Image (cartoon, rainbow, N blue to C red):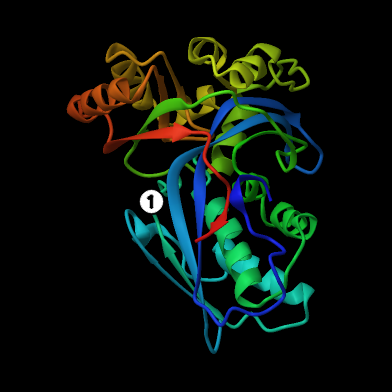
Amino acid sequence: MSGGTEAGRGTEASGGPVTVRVPAKVNVQLAVGAARPDGFHDLANVFLAVSLFDEVTATPAAALTITCEGPDADKVPLDRTNLAARAAELLAARHGISPDVHLHIAKDIPVAGGMAGGSADGAGALLACDALWGLGSSREELLEICAELGSDVPFSLVGGAALGTGRGEKLTELPVGGTFHWVFAVADGGLSTPTVFREFDRLAEGVEIPEPTASPVLLDALRTGDTTALAGALANDLQAPALSLRPSLAATLAAGTEAGALAALVSGSGPTTAFLVKDAEAAETVAAALIASGTCRTARPATSPAPGASVL
C-alpha cells in the first residue's frame, strides 16, 4: 500500500498489541461544487499528508473500548461515534467476528481542526485491527471501508498526495517532486465541517457554482516540487465560510504572512490555518511569530508529503 501501509501482510493474528501511525492532511486545493441532492458536494480536493501524526494501538479485549491521550483528548468522543470504533465494527462485521478490541489513540493531530484527525484515527484503527485479527485485507477492501467511514478516511490510509473527487473519497495518487515546509497554527476550539459546508451553501445562494476541477498549475507545482509556484496556486473554497463563522482567523492568517510565509490559507474546514514557507528555518521563524502574535493557541512546523497509515 502506498506510503507504507502494510495491508495484506499476512493472515496470522498478531496477538497484539498493534500500533499504527497515521498522518494529518492539508488541502492545498479544495474546490467545492454546488450541493447535491444527497446533501454532499462534489469536490476537487488535493490532499497532502503532513508530518503530524496520531498513533492508534489495538489490543485484544473483552469488548470494544476506546481511550485517548494527548492535546484536547477530552474533546475526542470515546463512544461508538468515534471513527476508530466504527472502523473496528465495520471490519469485524465484514468478517463475521466480534469487534472485541481496545483502541488507544495517542493524539498529536489537532482535534476538530480541519486536518482530518478523526479520519486519521479511523484509518489507523482499521489497519491496526486488520493486523491484530490476522485478516490480511486487500488495499481495495480497506479503501472500501474507509469510504464508508467518511470522505477523508481513504486518504488517511494512502497518504502522500492525492486528488479526491466525488465527495473526496475517490482518490488518484499524485506525484510530488520535493519536500514542502509548513507551519500549522492551532486555534482555540473547533469548527464543525457540516456547519462550514452549510455556511458555504448560505454564502453561495443565487450564485452559479462551477464544476470543481483540479488546478493544472497546482498539480504541476507538486510534481516539480516548486514551493513558489505552489504558494501561488493554493486555494480553499471553504476559507470564506470558515472566516465568516470565525472572523478572528483573519488575524492569524495576517500574522503568518507578515512573518514571512509564502502563502496562508485555512486548512480544510478550519479552524487550523496553514502557512507554506521556504524551508525549515523559515518554519521556525513563522511558528515563533505566530505564537508571539497571540492570534492562535500554538503553531507547529511540519513537512510534506508524509507516508500514509503505517504499522510500527
Work out whether 160 lies above or below 200: below
| Quadrant housing residue 297 | top left
On the question of residue 119 being in view, the answer is yes
Residue at coordinates 77% horizontally, 61% vertically from top-left?
A: 138
Q: Viewed as shown, does residue 252 lie left or right of 26? A: left
Residue at coordinates 61% horizontally, 45% vertically from top-left?
A: 3
Work out whether 261 lies above or below 112: above
Secondary structure found at label 1 = loop
Marks counted in the figure total: 1
Disc 1 marks which amino acid?
Asp
Q: Position of residue 159 (x, y in %)?
A: 60, 43
Q: Viewed as shown, does residue 198 lie left or right of 216? A: left
Residue at coordinates 72% horizontally, 43% vertically from top-left?
A: 169
On the question of residue 113 being in view, the answer is no
Viewer-closest of 187 and 289: 289
Viewer-closest of 115 and 294: 115
Counting other residues with Cα less than 10 Å from the Cα at mark 1, is it few (<14), some (14-19), or many (20 or more)?
some
Residue at coordinates 52% horizontally, 22% vertically from top-left?
A: 240
**Extreme residue toward the right, this view:** 37
| Quadrant housing residue 220 | top right
Can you identify the residue that label 1 sits on?
108
Q: Position of residue 148 (x, y in %)?
A: 73, 56
